[in-house]
């Protein structure tokens, strides 16, 4: 009871002291805390999330540290942010708490996932309500706080798996991919991870020359968003460094599916497909939707044959047309997805892999045809 009673008594004193010295512009003698903002990549803010309602950086210092274990110091820091950790919050575990920012919405959902490192010197949290998304981390050690969090990330070269809160796939995530015929070996080689927390959120890491340059997230409900600061490049870029022939697909899962069929020379577009083909091709400076092609130009210029294996629906075929117009139709080929039944065809690479197997997917690629002039007309005729 002793330590908890002390923390409960000190909390209003700390809070009052913080706001008083901030109004007087006097340096506050509390260890550095971090409040994530949308301009700090290391706070793992998502582009689809709104900004936190407030942000603050508490100046470096050593208040409350003498005579207290580092776990108690860590809890004091989080309490100043509104994260209340009781004596039941112990290192090495995950906890679902009430988010101090959104209060869990109308249902008061315990949506804040908190994890305290095993040694008690570091904590990380994230609210998984999509209209909140508040995330951050705190350190018991002053130096670690300054170097690990307080310093703003100004380029993707500073992006790390730890700063994004990524952890290895657990059994639930591996089972999710196994149902889709993706092996654990393929997942590991492609750096597929998950986001820290109880909710299963897949993280597709984007790398260039071995460095992490971005991340795209996917929930099991097929909601997608990208990490703020993600470079606009193709997914799997390092796999086509020396390739003379490549395959371009519409999603990260399809890229993994191609690998299961024996094709590593495959990349995925980072964004979705357009609803229709644009009327005219914009200049490269205004072609923002396909900027990733310009960013990967040195890789793509060396390729002599490009197989477009986008989705079989109208948006997927519109994407194929847009890609072919920019990459050069004379070096593009297209796939024909096999029939599912007398009324429809399989939609994409993963569907073929899941229901017909890797040999069938391999045959689809090997049977690719020269790209026709107008995919949009073909789709219209088939409707």
Image (cartoon, rainbow, N blue to C red):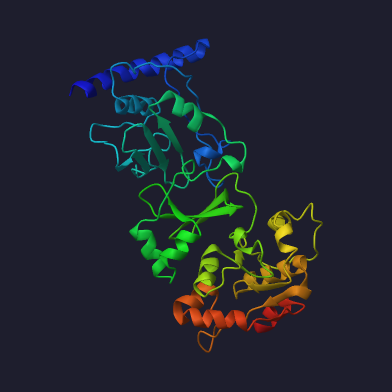
Residue 32: where, in percent of width, then height? 45, 23
> Measuring 34% from the left and 15% from the top, which residue is drawn there?
13
- Seen from the viewer's position, the closer of residues 281 and 142 is 142
Q: Is residue 91 above or below residue 6?
A: below
Question: x and y percent of residue 366 in the render?
Answer: 61, 82
Is the C terminus in the top left, top right, bottom left or bottom right quadrant?
Answer: bottom right
Residue occupying image coordinates x 32% and y 31%: 84
Place of residue 119 in the rendered image (x, y in percent of width and height, measured from the top left): 31, 35
Task: Name which residue lies at 60% across and 79% down.
Answer: 365
Q: Is residue 379 left or right of residue 107?
A: right
Q: Quadrant of the N terminus?
A: top left
Q: Is residue 310 left or right of residue 373?
A: left
Image position of 184 with respect to 333: above or below: above
Decide: is 213 above or below 253: above
Residue 157: name its quadrant: top right
Q: Nearest the camera: 326 or 223? A: 326
User: For the point 44% across and 17% down, which residue is it?
Assistant: 61
- Identify which residue, 29 or 24, lies in the foreground: 29
Which residue reaches farthest left?
Answer: 1
Q: Is residue 57 left or right of residue 245?
A: left
Q: Nearer the viewer, residue 217 or 190?
A: 190
Q: Is residue 271 visible?
A: no
Q: Is any part of residue 15 visible from this angle?
A: yes
| Quarter where residue 377 is shown | bottom right
| Image quarter of residue 159 | top right
């Amino acid at each position: 009871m002793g330590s908890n009673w002390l923390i409960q008594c000190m909390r209003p004193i700390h809070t009052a002291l913080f706001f008083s010295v901030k109004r007087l512009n006097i340096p506050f003698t509390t260890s550095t805390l971090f409040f994530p903002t949308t301009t700090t990549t290391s706070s793992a803010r998502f582009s689809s999330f709104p900004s936190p309602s407030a942000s603050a950086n508490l100046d470096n210092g050593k208040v409350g540290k003498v005579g207290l274990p580092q776990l108690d110091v860590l809890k004091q820091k989080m309490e100043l942010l509104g994260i209340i950790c009781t004596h039941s919050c112990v290192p090495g575990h995950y906890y679902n708490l009430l988010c101090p920012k959104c209060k869990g919405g109308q249902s008061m959902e315990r949506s804040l996932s908190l994890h305290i490192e095993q040694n008690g010197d570091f904590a990380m949290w994230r609210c998984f309500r999509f209209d909140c998304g508040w995330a951050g981390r705190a350190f018991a050690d002053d130096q670690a706080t300054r170097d690990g969090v307080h310093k703003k990330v100004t380029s993707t070269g500073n992006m790390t798996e730890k700063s994004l809160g990524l952890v290895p796939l657990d059994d639930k995530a591996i089972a999710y991919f196994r149902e889709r015929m993706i092996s654990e070996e393929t997942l590991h080689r492609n750096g597929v991870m998950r986001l820290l927390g109880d909710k299963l959120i897949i993280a597709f890491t984007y790398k260039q020359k071995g460095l992490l340059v971005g991340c795209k997230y996917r929930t099991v409900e097929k909601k997608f968003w990208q990490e703020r600061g993600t470079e606009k490049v193709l997914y799997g870029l390092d796999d086509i460094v020396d390739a003379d022939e490549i395959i371009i697909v519409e999603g990260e899962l399809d890229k993994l599916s191609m690998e299961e069929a024996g094709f590593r020379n495959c990349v995925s577009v980072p964004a979705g497909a357009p609803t229709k083909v644009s009327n005219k091709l914009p200049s490269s400076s205004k072609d923002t939707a396909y900027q990733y092609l310009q960013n990967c130009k040195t890789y793509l210029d060396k390729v002599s044959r490009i197989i477009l294996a986008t989705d079989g629906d109208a948006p997927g075929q519109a994407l194929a047309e847009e890609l072919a117009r920019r990459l050069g139709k004379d070096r593009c080929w297209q796939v024909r997805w096999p029939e599912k039944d007398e009324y429809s065809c399989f939609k994409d690479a993963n569907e073929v892999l899941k229901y017909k197997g890797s040999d069938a997917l391999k045959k689809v690629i090997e049977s690719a045809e020269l790209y026709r002039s107008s995919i949009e007309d073909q789709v219209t005729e088939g409707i």
